[in-house]
Image (cartoon, rainbow, N blue to C red):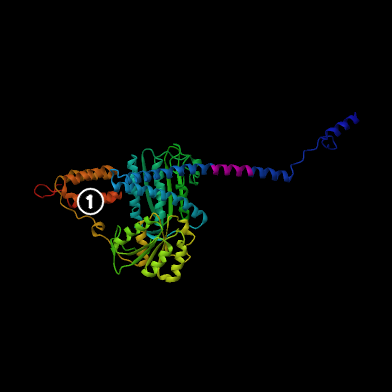
Amino acid sequence: MKGDTGVAAAETGRTKPSSEDGRAAPSRPPRGSEVDLAARIAALEQARAVAEAANQAKTRFLMGLSHEIRTPLNAIHGYAQLLERGAALSPAEAGRIIRRSSEHLADLVEGLLDISRIESGVLKLNRETVALRALLEQVAAMFRIEAGNKGLDFNYKPAANLPTWVLADERRLRQVLINLLSNAIKYTPAGSVTLSVRYRSMVAEFEVADTGIGIAPEDAERIFQPFDRGGGRAAGVAPGIGLGLALSRMLAHVMGGDISVKAAPGGGSIFVLKLLLPQPNAQPEAEAQGLPIGYEGRPRTILAIDDDPGQLALWQELLRPIGFNLFVAGSGGAGLSLAELGKPDVVLLDVSMPGLSGWDVARRLRERFGRNLVILMVSGNASELVGAVGDGLHDGFVLKPVDQQQLFAMLRRHLGLVWRHEAAAAAPIASQMLPAAAKAYLIELARLARTGRVRDLSASLAQLAAAVPQAAALVARLTTVLDDYDLATFQKLLAEQQADGAPEGPEGDPIS
């Protein structure tokens, strides 16, 4: 039997060592290499899951981006074809639609570039004096219209101690506020959206509260991830590419603040933006509003170099009517020759051109004219400009499509200009006595302005112009303001007219 046992043990090779008392010895613990292998397998599984999630997010992002790009492109393409065919439509209305669509495309591209700049650490902030109260009034007026079109109530509640002026990057502050308010309206099917602003110890707190669909607690952080399009929201995914909240929080961090959210499913959401916004030591002088019609002092010369004839035509339309001597060139070589002849004060220089690039031309201009020549680089791709910041070849850059206000602000700063503005455009309309027939129209316009019904306002203005010829000047001013969607100014003009220029009765007495 012992022999048989020995043979069986030899054949199986699985006999366990025994202790002296005959009990089986305990099994040995796993070796260190086996533990390391298990940990590596677990880490690889986790990395694979993260990679798959990122890949799915990017796929969703590309699908959303395709949709977001096609919508404005279809509008631009469609209206361009209608204009080419001479269709019976208002050129001003077609131009507004094309402009808004192109601005939407530019915003999409800028959002992508901003995230890239932040992640690579090259985003730079401006520290400028910002009219905080005016900025918030403009943003509130814009979203009051958008909320009204969706049947929502919009409330704006500024603190009484809110400063008039603060130091901030106005463009980035406006961008974050617009993202938060746009999201609130997007995810609120009914009810209200409220913007509350508080200020204490140089810290501004912007609270955007809505009565919308809410956010599940487990999604409170996920919605700030790039490419997330609100999939955790109770009502499903909304249109968009999922960059708004991610970019907003990134910008808030860059500005030294933060964004937090308090929400519950079905109970609405509250987003809170906190930023350090100190007040400037000195109050800035009030600037005239609107685009300039000229400037004081000697005529200045500008050279525009661009291989795009359309862009050169735009420079001519913008700059020649307000008194600049303008030379244009379609290539870098021609631009260098004109610079020798014209001795410009400023060069608007396109970056991407065949042959000599904008940077090549800038280098030669700087060598020839030194720092006395102001060189402003122009490009539709901001990434072409970021890497050259501080290289001394240029004094600033202008992004396409051109923001006219920013362009004129740059020219004023670099050339020390004092702009002249049209008095009628800069100052409120002088109140005039209108006949009694105007009273009903003014009341109706005030009612429509409070509800933000822009299309109805246009129709009512046309009716006032037809029924009361004496109101032509008022109608023209109100139409201009309405075209800019500036309902705050629209209501102010109406209030001034009704207070100081009430419609008069048959004997010329104002009607109460």
Q: From the viewer's perspective, is residue 164 above or below residue 449?
A: below
What residue do we see at 32% from left, 48% from top? 96
In this orientation, does residue 11 appear? yes
Segment colored magenta:
44-55
| Magenta stretch holds residue 75 | no
Mark 1: give few (<14), some (14-19) or many (20+) Cα within 10 Å.
some
Give how far across and how far down residue 293 sits, in percent: 28, 61
Magenta stretch: dominant secondary structure:
helix
What residue do we see at 88% from left, 30% from top? 5
The image shows a total of numbered marks equal to: 1
Judge by depth and name the residue closer to the eye, 446 or 381.
381
Q: Quadrant of the N terminus?
A: top right
Judge by depth and name the residue closer to the eye, 100 or 502.
100
Which residue in the protein does label 1 denote? 476
**Side of 86 relative to 103 (left or right):** left
Give how far across and how far down residue 454 sits, in percent: 28, 44
Extreme residue in the top direction: 1
Give how far across and how far down residue 33 sits, in percent: 73, 45
What residue do we see at 47% from left, 59% from top? 386
Extreme residue in the left direction: 507
In this orientation, does residue 487 appear? no
Give how far across and how far down residue 400 sits, in percent: 40, 55
Q: From the viewer's perspective, is residue 238 above or below residue 491?
A: above
Q: Amino acid at mark 1?
A: Ala
What residue do we see at 40% from left, 67% from top? 337
Q: From the viewer's perspective, is residue 93 above or below residue 164?
A: above
Please tell me whether mark 1 sits on a helix, a strand or a loop: helix
